Image (cartoon, grey):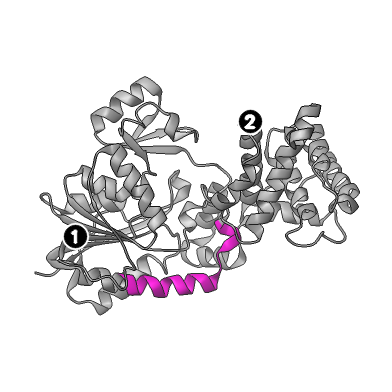
Amino acid sequence: MSSQDKKRGRGKSGARRAAAGMLAAIERGKTLDEARDRLDPLKGSDRNLADAIVQTALRHYGEIDALVRTHVKKMPPRNSLARVLLFIGAAQLLYMKVPPHAAIDETVSATGRREQPYRGLINAVLRNLARAQQAATLPAPDPLKNIPDWLRDNWLAHYGDEKTAALAASLATPPPLDLCFVTPRTGHNWAQAHGGNFIAPSHIRLDAAQDVTALPGFAEGAFWMQNAAAGQPAAQICAALAAPSTVLDMCAAPGGKTLQLAAAGHTVTALDISASRLKRLEENLARTGFEARLVCADALAWNAPQLFDAVLLDAPCTATGTLRRHPDVLRHRSANQMDKLIALQKQLLARAADHVKPGGFLAYAVCSLQPQEGEMQLEDFLATRSDFTKHDSDAENRFTPDADMDGFFVSVMQKKP
């Protein structure tokens, strides 16, 4: 590291220290996106490296924890930088293409004054792991260790051993980048010019994540970022509606579904409780040239001025279907939180149903893999609301990340005339 880098606190060990600070913040409850402010002092490759280290550590957290504990009599205090430095060092050694000497030396160099008592421990543990890797004596990969007990048990009960193992294994792979284009022809021309493959009528897939704002066509509003599975709720509502209609998008932000509905010619009201997230939707509407009525309010308390031809509810959930892009969810969710979210979903579904015209449609969606938030929630709703029936029994309604897309549940219901 140059003297200038040392002075600025940057360089490769600076990237490791920033990664450690970021992971420690996540352990204290910050989301992955919120914790990225620790990367602000870094630029270019150092910033990308730190972010990749943290995501890798989160994806393999359980496996790393088990391996580190075999070489430590007493772990450093929880949430301490010393503890997370062990994790980011192991992540580089075992799951990234980082040379062992660089992974070890730069991680050890990232220790500060408070971590000095653990400097020798960090060095010894990482070197032991490196030797075990070279000697091929490490345990076989076990992705199920990365899934919290409550979640693993839930999946095993509902999906079985084979499917649960596939879901856990899918977490290890960062997701591709999906783009939703305003028109299929624009997407086709873009794919030919810049790479990518069609995976849905309006969706293009790129192999790796990148800065979307730098891609050709972004500034002109030709597309927005949206996983193909996340595009299903709006696509299924549009398929149910025979003509341009009035649609309420509940819990709308950040707005991909609002954009889809507006692009299809519908008159859209986008409702969300978060003003900051609605601001992002407003910016995307301006960039793409579409219009929607934006309402910042609590969906449980908001009184609609009209009934709608269709209502789309993408309800708050545990978000376990997005683990590939948000691996921090594994550190933050619990069975107790899921129970609270299930109760909220029931309330929101009941409220959404009241906004639907007779003969209109209601789409319910969650980016959760747990049936309690999806299939079972739908069954409970239909059992108590005789005025609704399932609209299309043939439509696919469960998407899982082992099929290389986000996990999603969606179902469209129709209100009796």
- Kind of residue sitting beneath label 2: Ser
> Quarter holding the C terminus?
bottom left
Is residue 347 covered in magenta? yes
Please identify the residue farthest to the bottom as the structure is shown.
384
Does dot 1 land on a helix, a strand or a loop? strand
Q: Main secondary structure of the magenta part?
A: helix
Residue occupying the point 84% across, 52% down = 115
Asked whether, in this view, residue 376 is left or right of residue 325, the answer is left
Residue 393 in sight in this render: yes
Q: Which amino acid, mark 1?
A: Ala
Quadrant including the N terminus: top right
Which circle, 1 or 2, is nearer the viewer? 2
Residue 189, given in percent of the width and then of the height, sits at 29, 23
Mark 2 Cα-neighbour bin, 10 Å: few <14, some 14–19, many ≥20: few
- Foreground of the two, 341 or 43: 43
Q: Is residue 145 visible?
A: no
Residue 110: quarter of image? top right
Provide the residue span drawn in magenta. Answer: 329-348
Which label is found at residue 310? Answer: 1
Q: Is residue 396 left or right of residue 74?
A: left
For residue 272, above or below residue 327? below
- Give the residue at mark 2: 45
Mark 1 touches mark 2? (CB < 8 Å): no
340 and 156: which is toward the camera: 340
221 up-or-down from 314: above or below: above
Determine the secondary structure under disc 2. Answer: helix
Q: Is residue 340 magenta?
A: yes
Would residue 227 be found to the left or right of residue 104 on screen? left
Q: Earlier in the sequence, mark 1 or mark 2?
A: 2
What residue is rendered at 16% in x and 62% in y?
A: 308
Residue drawn at x 56%, y 54% is 165
Examine the rendered structure and indicate whether residue 159 appears above or below residue 263.
Answer: below
